[in-house]
Image (cartoon, rainbow, N blue to C red):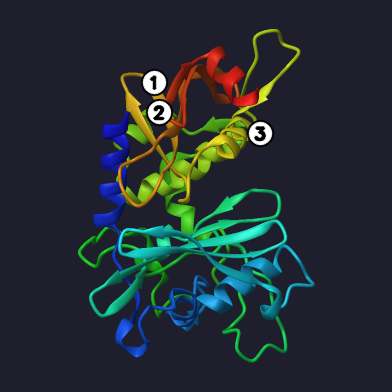
């Protein structure tokens, strides 16, 4: 299991293009990561424009979707943890927050937008691909305020010619619908309808998906997982995302959690890890073994087994559930 997490962290670290940075030399040592990060500019996640937005405004726009009373001055910025050659920055207001990894690379502070972790007041998680925004008026320093569930157009390396984001370049049609970023994937893979997957064999799709396709399929999985649970008496139901949130409360972690889907045989495995520091050390994790069940109106996913580790101690099935909830 730890080998898998090392692979995933290494994969994420090497695959995603670093597209946001700020020279360290502009600042007096020791580096003020918070003020540096605030000023870093990235392309706006709003696919209807090509303007840049700095991370301070990005955070503010997201938190505004949760609390109308938030102001830039009321947002708490802090160094939540030390990373190897960097810092984990947290910007929060009440129960909503954003976590940003800032890594010092020579004379630059670098931020990978795909690694920014957005969490709303209800603990729903977003990334740069689907982060919601609040339309903000009369705010001169918030650039081109944006709509919800938008696409990001500078996410993957330029040599990936099959990138789904290449359709959202400077020639993007402003009259395109909000659903259009995923339209070609819906046509190819189908989608979730009333908690059932319609359009083919979901597990087989995940097994054969390329990098860009996997984002769409993971969102479809999350939609189905919202209503997935385990029960042994049909009286008490433990929902997957609630299980994950409960484990996160117990985990000794100082990093944003990571998650991934993988297929072995005819089973789908959904794994969530809670890393400790910026390395392969992941003392807490949970894995769900999942299978498909066919119905007349589509496929449903069901949980066969649960295994987890809580700060280095491993559990399986109902021992895992009991340990997480006790």
Of helix, strand and loop, which one carries label 3? loop
Q: Give the CA separation, mark 1 to mark 2.
A: 7 Å
Q: Are marks 1 and 2 in contact (CB under 8 Å)?
A: yes
Which residue bears the numbered disc 3?
Answer: 194
Q: Estimate the x, y position of residue 119 in percent, counting from the top left.
A: 60, 55
Of helix, strand and loop, which one carries label 1? strand
Q: Is residue 210 above or below residue 237?
A: below
Specify the quadrant of the image occupied by residue 69.
bottom right
Side (left or right) of 273 relative to 147: left
Q: Estimate the x, y position of residue 131 in percent, counting from the top left.
A: 56, 61
Side (left or right) of 197 relative to 169: right
Q: Are marks 1 and 3 in contact (CB under 8 Å)?
A: no
Q: What label sits on residue 221 in the rendered view?
A: none
Q: Estimate the x, y position of residue 203 in percent, counting from the top left.
A: 40, 28
Q: Give the CA separation, mark 3 to mark 2.
A: 18 Å
At horizontal 54% and vertical 31% (from top left) the residue drawn is 197
At horizontal 36% and vertical 19% (from top left) the residue drawn is 266
Location of the C terminus (image quadrant)? top right
Location of the N terminus (image quadrant)? top left
Residue nearer the viewer, 180 or 3: 3
Residue nearer the viewer, 324 or 294: 324
Classed neighbour count for the residue bearing mark 2: other residues with Cα under 10 Å, few (<14), some (14–19), many (≥20): many
Which residue bears the numbered disc 1?
Answer: 267
Q: Estimate the x, y position of residue 107 in percent, counting from the top left.
A: 25, 80
Classed neighbour count for the residue bearing mark 3: other residues with Cα under 10 Å, few (<14), some (14–19), many (≥20): few
Of helix, strand and loop, which one carries label 2? helix
Which residue bears the numbered disc 2?
Answer: 203
At horizontal 44% and vertical 78% (from top left) the residue drawn is 32
């Amino acid at each position: 299991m730890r080998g898998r997490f090392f692979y995933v962290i290494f994969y994420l670290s090497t695959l995603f293009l670093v597209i946001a940075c700020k020279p360290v030399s502009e600042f007096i040592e020791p580096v003020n990561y918070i003020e540096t990060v605030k000023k870093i500019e990235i392309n706006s996640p709003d696919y209807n424009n090509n303007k840049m937005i700095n991370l301070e405004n990005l955070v503010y726009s997201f938190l505004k979707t949760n609390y109308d009373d938030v102001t830039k001055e009321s947002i708490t910025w802090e160094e939540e943890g030390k990373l190897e050659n960097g810092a984990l920055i947290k910007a929060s207001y009440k129960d909503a927050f954003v976590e940003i990894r800032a890594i010092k690379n020579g004379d630059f502070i670098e931020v990978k937008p795909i690694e920014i972790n957005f969490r709303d007041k209800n603990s729903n998680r977003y990334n740069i691909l689907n982060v919601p925004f609040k339309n903000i008026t009369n705010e001169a320093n918030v650039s081109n305020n944006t709509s919800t569930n938008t696409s990001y157009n500078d996410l993957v390396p330029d040599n990936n010619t099959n990138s789904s984001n290449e359709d959202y370049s400077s020639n993007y049609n402003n009259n395109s619908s909000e659903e259009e970023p995923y339209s070609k994937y819906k046509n190819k893979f189908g989608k979730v309808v009333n908690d059932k997957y319609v359009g083919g064999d979901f597990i087989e799709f995940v097994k054969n998906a390329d990098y860009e396709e996997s984002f769409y399929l993971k969102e479809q999985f999350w939609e189905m997982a919202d209503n997935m649970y385990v029960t042994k008496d049909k009286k008490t139901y433990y929902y997957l995302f609630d299980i994950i949130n409960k484990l996160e409360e117990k985990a000794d972690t100082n990093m944003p959690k990571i998650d991934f889907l993988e297929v072995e045989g005819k089973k789908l495995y959904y794994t969530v890890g809670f890393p400790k520091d910026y390395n392969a050390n992941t003392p807490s994790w949970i894995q769900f073994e999942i299978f498909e069940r066919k119905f007349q109106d589509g496929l449903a996913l069901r949980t066969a087994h649960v295994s987890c580790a809580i700060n280095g101690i491993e559990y399986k099935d109902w021992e895992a559930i009991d340990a997480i909830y006790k």
